[in-house]
Image (tube, grey):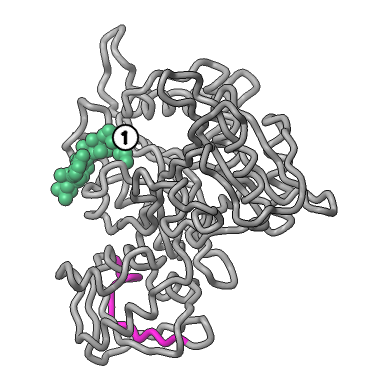
Amino acid sequence: MTVEYRQFPASVTPQGPDPDTSRWMRAAFDGFLVNHPDPGEAQRIASSWQAEGRTLHAFYDPRETPNGFLGNDVPVATMATFTAGLHGGGDADIPCLLVADVTVRTTHRGQGLMRRLMDRVLAEASRQGVPLAALHAAHPALYERFGFAPATRSASIEVDCARFALKVQPPGLVHEADPGIVALFDGQLSASGRARHLGALQPHRVPTDAVSRRATAERGSRCLVHVDASGQVDGMMTFVFRGWTPDAQVIDVLSESWCTTDARAALWQTVTSTGIATTVRARDTALDEPLQWMLQDRSAMRVTAVTDGLSLRILDTAKALEGRGYCCPPASVALEVVDALDTVAGRWRITVNDGRATLRATCEPPEVQLHAVDMAAVFLGATRVNTLADAGRVTGSPSALATLTMVMSASSDPLSTLHF
Ligand SMILES: CC(C)(COP(=O)(O)OP(=O)(O)OC[C@H]1O[C@@H](n2cnc3c(N)ncnc32)[C@H](O)[C@@H]1OP(=O)(O)O)[C@@H](O)C(=O)NCCC(=O)NCCS
């Protein structure tokens, strides 16, 4: 099939998305079989894409179509990319290409269009020296063939309000705030040292995170803000009440952001003490969740689901591993990474000292052999190297596997709450 490739920046005018962006948006929404946004929503989405600096990639089928059919100016395949920094525990965030809205029109599927788009954007990012790519995979098996593996996991939790009681009363005050000014508080929290999980993403073009987007996307959302003894905002939570049902009255936490443990504890105390909700639920919490250990009765909180989070693709082995932080004692292992990209594949010696790694290409026989997709799975420490060895995916001597397991381990659970 002959198709034409085009890429352009997402763009918005005072009247709405520009014509190319509007048709691209239509194709992407059709690809996911979701309703087209109304004009106000389309304007909001396109403005956010433009602010993030999204590049929209598309294939067009140039064949003429009869009147009343979708025109040949509407893409038959879509993919969006933009850049962010990934917190890998090192001194600086690791540059990362974010990939979103991967769709191919139903009538054009199974003909390699997605593969052509993916190969193109990954090869281009690798050429530009970007060490990582990331996406949210609805179909992990689909993305594994492109070298992506889930690199974070997150828990969904449910808290029984009647049994929520903190062990220690936190200082400071909680206020209700207008959810419309969430972005303002978000900026203040970033400036005053918001707690960041390993795996957190910060888009390069917009100094914001999931907080403002999720908070403003939900109708009826509410906002709580914590201020410390000096009056400084040091925590924020947005939530929505799901209404009355005969069995339970549920609040869903939409977002949380905090600089101190006290702020987080106080926000949870407030959201669980409305006197109306019986249950508070939250997604995107760490598997090893500290909140549970703050409670007098840890069974007041239970994990209802564990899901894969962010999927990563290594695009440059040396840059990616040198950008990450390490919490192990000095160690050194010779690796062989198997991959189609020559910035990834090869024999490397990784040497870790004082929390940092250096990689040099080597000719020596590898002590551990693994594919790039497995390197992505262990990159943030969510999966152990030894787990993949037990699955028959990574090979090496027991001592070398143990050393690499220790090298790649993380001091806390990686978690990524930015949905893009
Ligand atoms: C998923 C989707 C983008 C695939 O597009 P496509 O053009 O048909 O895919 P391709 O023909 O390029 O296939 C690429 C490869 O993925 C495989 N593949 C395609 N769809 C797959 C799926 N749902 N699960 C697993 N593998 C899949 C193909 O076999 C092919 O493998 P190969 O190149 O190794 O032979 C398309 O089906 C779609 O738009 N689905 C709805 C939207 C969606 O789910 N997007 C992904 C969101 S994470």
Residue 362 appears in which quarter of the rendering?
bottom left
Number of residue marks: 1
Beta carbon of the mark 1 residue lies under 8 A of ligand 1: yes
Is residue 112 at least partly visible in the picture? no
Q: Which amino acid does label 1 sit on?
A: Thr
**Spot occupied by residue 322 in the image (x, y as percentages of width and height):** 47, 76
Residue 379 appears in which quarter of the rendering?
bottom left
In the depicted structure, whether residue 67 falls above or below residue 219 = above
Q: Is residue 119 left or right of residue 247?
A: left
In the depicted structure, whether residue 352 falls above or below residue 182 = below
Which residue is at 36% across, 35% downward?
78
Q: SS at mark 1?
A: strand
Which residue is at 32% across, 30% downward?
60
**Spot occupied by residue 92 in the image (x, y as percentages of width and height):** 58, 68
Which residue is at 47% across, 77% downward?
326
Q: Which is more toward the observer, 403 or 172?
A: 172
**Spot occupied by residue 20 in the image (x, y as percentages of width and height):** 47, 27
Q: In this view, does 2 lie to the left or right of 419?
A: left
Which residue is at 66% across, 47% downward?
266
Task: Inspect the magenta stretch and tell me whether residue 8 lies in it.
Answer: no
Name of the residue lying farthest toward the top: 67
Q: Give the range drawn in magenta.
A: 341-352
Query: Which quadrant of the figure contains the N terminus?
Result: top left
**Spot occupied by residue 241 in the image (x, y as percentages of width and height):** 54, 26
The residue carrying pointer 1 sits among few (fewer than 14), some (14 to 19) or many (20 or more) residues within 10 Å by Cα, namely: many
The residue that label 1 is drawn on is 103
Name of the residue lying farthest toward the right: 230
Q: In this view, does 170 lie to the left or right of 2?
A: right
Is residue 388 at least partly visible in the picture? yes
Q: Which is more toward the observer, 47 or 328?
A: 328
Residue 337 appears in which quarter of the rendering?
bottom left
